[in-house]
């Protein structure tokens, strides 16, 4: 098999590119080194669909942010993932902050962000009664929203696979060659050979959407020399008992390290706060620290005083990909381009915030680049299906619909995760989907089984049993999150 386009990376950006390409005739694949999609930055971020007022006017970041934000409402409906247009507020606490808010408003206007307003303290506190009395005003961005980043990634990837895209899992790229003439066959001229731990994959074009490792993939191909530096950010998550603390996404005025610590509702009814911003060299540094958690808590209390710390049910860290030129200067924009030296190789690197928001628009932008590389107009895929059903939520259904679900499938009558009221029917559907879960975290990301108050303390043994049964593997082969993360070591009796 020779693929028209091979996409390296199964995060939100790679998944969106794959789905966009699947609208056209051709052979496409995603190559992902983890055992699932959304295992890197895409699973551990704020889940904010940014309005687009922060990026510098004229940059790709600004253009694709605004375009991507406008695409999310319809995509969420057709691909069946949760999205809420809750709006965001950038809160000012003094006159200097208000000057900064005004500049952000002007930048948003220049970027074409709709429905921006600067509001006073009275209106702010009507919108958000829990916000500190010290707040003196804010900018309201009505077009902002929230999304589940891993659910969205799964939806885009699954729809791509439904439309013929091949997903290679646990397939790490170790080398890339571009063949002038391979084995004396002229038909191989110009093809890329991607060497992985499992097999060699040939493609006419390669898209590098490898996130934190995009610099290494580019180097393998002999393409643009840039460096990805990781920036770790810690978060904490509050129980859904605290859902009333905020309805909008609440920002403080940003600083040189980013948008700062925010407080936001999630699409699942929790309250999320973070991230910190710690630069380092370790791209796998997703541990949390006492100091980091204290920093998040201290800064979030500036926005909402007296946050009930006893209701923190989880903490986690994500790592963002910041791009730097070879000389060490920051790129300060997305890198999305066909390489000048290695034709047919497209870098999609440095996709930090607002990368989640921009991802659907990045998919369209990259498809246009590929079309220009091909030198011919794409032929539409007549069999493309742009709708994905997803998994129906038992928790959100009314009593009549619950009864119907149980009658149609008795597995819906068995509650596995009591905290989130997730049924065995939903878990089995998540495992058997076109991009099915293969480990505990995969089930968790698709169904929320294990994301409640007890954090899988009660349901993980049952989910392990279900994975074993449905995948046809021994229970000792069931993993938490790929690699060697086995849940069990053997029988005790």
Image (tube, rainbow, N blue to C red):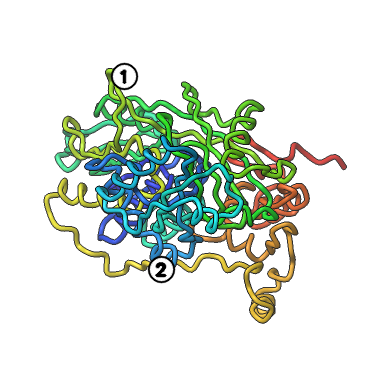
To which residue does mark 2 refer? 387
- Front residue of 123/166: it is 123
Rendered residue at 50%/42% (across/down): 45
Instruction: Tell me the number on the disc at residue 328.
Output: 1
Circle 2 residues within 10 Å: few <14, some 14–19, many ≥20: some
Q: Quadrant of residue 189?
A: top left
For the residues carrying marks 1 and 2, which lies nearer the camera in this image? Answer: 1
Q: Quadrant of residue 336?
A: top left
Mark 1 touches mark 2? (CB < 8 Å): no
Which quadrant of the structure image shows residue 302? Answer: top right
Q: Is 405 or 259 nearer to us in this picture?
A: 259
- N-terminal of the pair, mark 1 or mark 2, is 1
- Measured from the top left, where is residue 450 in percent x and y? 68, 51
Mark 1: which secondary structure?
Answer: loop
Against 317, residue 474 (above or below) is below
How far from the left and from the top, in percent, is residue 401? Answer: 64, 79
Q: Residue 107: give x, y in percent of width and height.
A: 29, 44
In this view, 385 is above or below 275:
below
User: Is residue 363 something that shows in the picture?
Assistant: yes
């Amino acid at each position: 098999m020779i693929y028209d386009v091979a996409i390296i990376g199964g995060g939100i950006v790679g998944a969106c590119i794959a789905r966009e390409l699947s609208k056209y005739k051709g052979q496409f694949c995603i190559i992902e080194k983890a055992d699932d999609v959304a295992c890197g930055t895409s699973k551990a971020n704020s889940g904010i669909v940014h309005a687009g007022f922060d990026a510098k006017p004229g940059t790709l970041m600004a253009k694709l942010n605004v375009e991507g934000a406008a695409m999310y409402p319809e995509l969420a409906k057709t691909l069946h993932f949760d999205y809420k247009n809750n709006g965001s507020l950038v809160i000012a606490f003094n006159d200097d902050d208000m000057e900064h808010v005004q500049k952000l408003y002007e930048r948003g206007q220049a970027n074409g962000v709709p429905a921006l307003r600067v509001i006073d303290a009275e209106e702010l506190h009507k919108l958000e009664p829990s916000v500190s009395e010290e707040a003196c005003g804010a900018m309201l961005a009505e077009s902002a929203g929230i999304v589940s980043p891993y659910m969205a990634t799964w939806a885009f990837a699954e729809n791509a696979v439904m439309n013929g895209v091949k997903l290679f899992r646990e397939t790490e790229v170790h080398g890339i060659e571009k063949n002038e003439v391979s084995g004396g066959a002229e038909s191989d001229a110009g093809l890329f050979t991607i060497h992985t731990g499992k097999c060699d994959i040939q493609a006419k074009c390669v898209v590098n959407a490898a996130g934190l490792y995009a610099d290494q993939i580019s180097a393998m191909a002999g393409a643009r020399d840039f460096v990805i530096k990781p920036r770790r950010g810690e978060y904490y998550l509050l129980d859904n008992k605290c859902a009333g603390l905020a309805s909008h996404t609440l920002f403080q005025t940003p600083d040189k390290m980013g948008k700062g610590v925010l407080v936001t509702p999630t699409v699942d009814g929790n309250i999320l706060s973070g991230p910190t911003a710690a630069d380092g060299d370790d791209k796998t540094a997703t541990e949390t620290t006492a100091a980091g958690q204290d920093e998040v808590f201290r800064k979030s209390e500036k926005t909402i005083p007296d946050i009930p710390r006893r209701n923190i049910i989880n903490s986690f860290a994500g790592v963002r990909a910041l791009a730097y030129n070879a000389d060490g200067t920051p790129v300060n924009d997305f890198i999305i381009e066909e390489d000048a030296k290695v034709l047919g190789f497209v870098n999609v690197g440095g996709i930090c915030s607002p990368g989640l928001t921009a991802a659907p628009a990045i998919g369209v932008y990259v498809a246009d680049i590929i079309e220009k590389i091909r030198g011919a107009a794409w032929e539409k895929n007549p069999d493309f299906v742009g709708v994905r059903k997803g998994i129906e939520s038992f928790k959100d259904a009314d009593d009549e619909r619950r009864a119907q679900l149980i009658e149609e499938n008795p597995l819906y009558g068995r509650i596995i995760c009591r905290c989130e009221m997730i049924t065995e029917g939903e878990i089995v559907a998540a495992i058997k989907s076109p991009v099915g879960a293969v480990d505990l975290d995969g089930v968790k990301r698709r169904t929320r089984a294990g994301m409640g108050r007890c954090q899988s303390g009660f349901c993980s043994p049952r989910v392990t049993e279900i994975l074993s049964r449905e995948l046809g593997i021994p229970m000792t082969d069931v993993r938490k999150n790929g690699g060697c993360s086995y849940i069990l070591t053997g029988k005790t009796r």
